[in-house]
Image: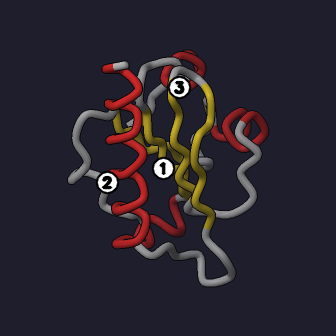
Amino acid sequence: NIRSLQQVQLLSQDECVVVQVNADWNFSASVNLSKLKNCAIFNANIDHPAYGAAIKDAWNVKSVPTIIMFEYGKEIKRFEAGLSFKLNEDTILREIKDEINDIQLRKLR
């Protein structure tokens, strides 16, 4: 879990980072990202007093949960919840795993 604004600013610079942005009131709708491998996984809370507003603005978060995937600081994939404030976990995990595989292949080239 993210603990500071500095961590927020630095975390997306790694090779592969997946950040799930959610809120206290919607925690039950979080996607279980722990199954992902070869990528740093973080959970961010837009209600956190130290960095919540900064994340919302910097990453243009309009609904929760929102999952953003970064490759060396560049956003490469985004999943946003609709009116239900939920995401399809199976679809998201499959698409993120495909992106991780693509990152690994680019690294080998």
Looking at the image, tell me whether mark 3 or mark 1 is earlier in sequence order. 3
What is the three-letter code of the residue carrying label 1?
Answer: Gln
SS for tag 1? strand
Say whether marks 1 and 2 touch (CB < 8 Å): yes
Residue placed furthest toward the bottom = 84
Q: Estimate the spatial distance between the alpha carbons at disc 1 and disc 2, rounded to whole Å.
A: 8 Å
The residue tagged 2 is 33
Q: Estimate the spatial distance between the alpha carbons at disc 3 and disc 1, rounded to whole Å.
A: 12 Å
Q: Is residue 43 above or below residue 62?
A: above
What residue is at 60 percent from the left and 83 percent from the top? Answer: 84
Between residue 48 and residue 32, name the one nearer to us.
32
The residue tagged 1 is 20
SS for tag 3? loop
If the image is split into quadrants, where does the C terminus sit?
top left
Q: Quadrant of residue 93?
A: bottom left
What residue is at 32 percent from the left and 41 percent from the top? Answer: 101
Nearer to us: label 3 or label 1: 3
What is the three-letter code of the residue carrying label 3?
Answer: Ser
Q: Estimate the spatial distance between the alpha carbons at disc 3 and disc 2, rounded to whole Å.
A: 16 Å
Is residue 45 in view? Answer: yes
Looking at the image, tell me whether mark 1 or mark 2 is earlier in sequence order. 1
Judged left or right of residue 91, residue 26 is: right
If the image is split into quadrants, where does the N terminus sit?
top left
What is the three-letter code of the residue carrying label 2?
Answer: Leu
- Residue 68 pos. (x, y %): 55, 46
Label annotation for residue 80: none
The residue tagged 3 is 12
- Residue 103 pos. (x, y %): 40, 32
- Residue 102 pos. (x, y %): 39, 39
